[in-house]
Image (cartoon, helix red, strand yellow):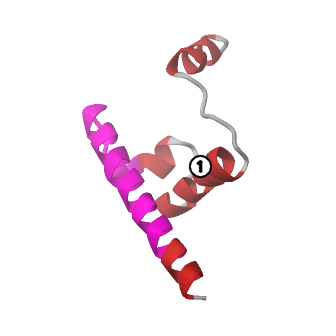
């Protein structure tokens, strides 16, 4: 049980690091971190929830996030 608690504590540290980095990215693009859920069209999702979903897709399911170039291509289809 102690191993699970330690693993969860480490995971929470990873979430904190991700949120700190996201905050910096938001500032570079003229936004604030607390507005990110709204900007992503997920106004009722907390930031930790969004990070958790990202980790589930990228770590647990092994899917990589698309490249910036791929996102730009998708955006051009609109």
Specify whether residue 16 is painted magenta: yes
Q: Residues within 10 Å of mark 1 (few under 14, many from 20)?
A: some
Q: How many marks?
A: 1
Residue furthest to the front in view is 3
Looking at the image, residue 66 lies above or below residue 10: above
Q: Could you say where residue 21 lies in the image, as x and y percent from the top left?
A: 33, 46
Q: Residue at x 53, y 82 (%)?
A: 5
Residue at 69% in and 43% down: 62
| Above or below 75: residue 36 | below
Q: Nearer the viewer, residue 39 or 10?
A: 10
Q: Is residue 60 above or below residue 1?
A: above
* Residue plotted at (60% across, 17% down): 70
Residue 34 showing in the rendered view = no
* Residue under pointer 1: 54
Q: Quadrant of the N terminus?
A: bottom right
Residue extending farthest to the bottom is: 1
* Residue 28 placement: quadrant: top left
Residue 6 visible to the viewer: yes
Secondary structure, magenta segment, majority class: helix
Side of 59 relative to 18 (left or right)? right
Horizontally, is 18 left or right of 30 in the view?
right
Residue shown at the point (49%, 48%) measured from the top left: 38
In this view, the residue in front, 5 or 42, is 5
Image quadrant in which you'd find residue 25: top left
Which image quarter holds the C terminus?
top right
Instruction: Specify start and end residues of the magenta stretch as a single range.
Output: 8-35
Point out residue 27 in the picture as x, y percentages from the top left corner.
Answer: 26, 40
State whether residue 33 is above or below residue 5: above
Q: Secondary structure at mark 1?
A: helix
Residue 32 place in picture, x, y as percent = 31, 47
């Amino acid at each position: 049980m102690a191993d699970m608690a330690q693993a969860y504590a480490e995971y929470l540290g990873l979430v904190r690091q991700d949120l700190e980095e996201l905050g910096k990215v938001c500032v570079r693009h003229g936004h604030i971190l607390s507005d990110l859920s709204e900007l992503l069209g997920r106004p009722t999702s907390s930031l930790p929830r969004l990070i958790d979903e990202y980790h589930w897709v990228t770590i647990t399911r092994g899917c990589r996030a698309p490249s910036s170039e791929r996102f730009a291509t998708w955006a051009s289809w609109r």
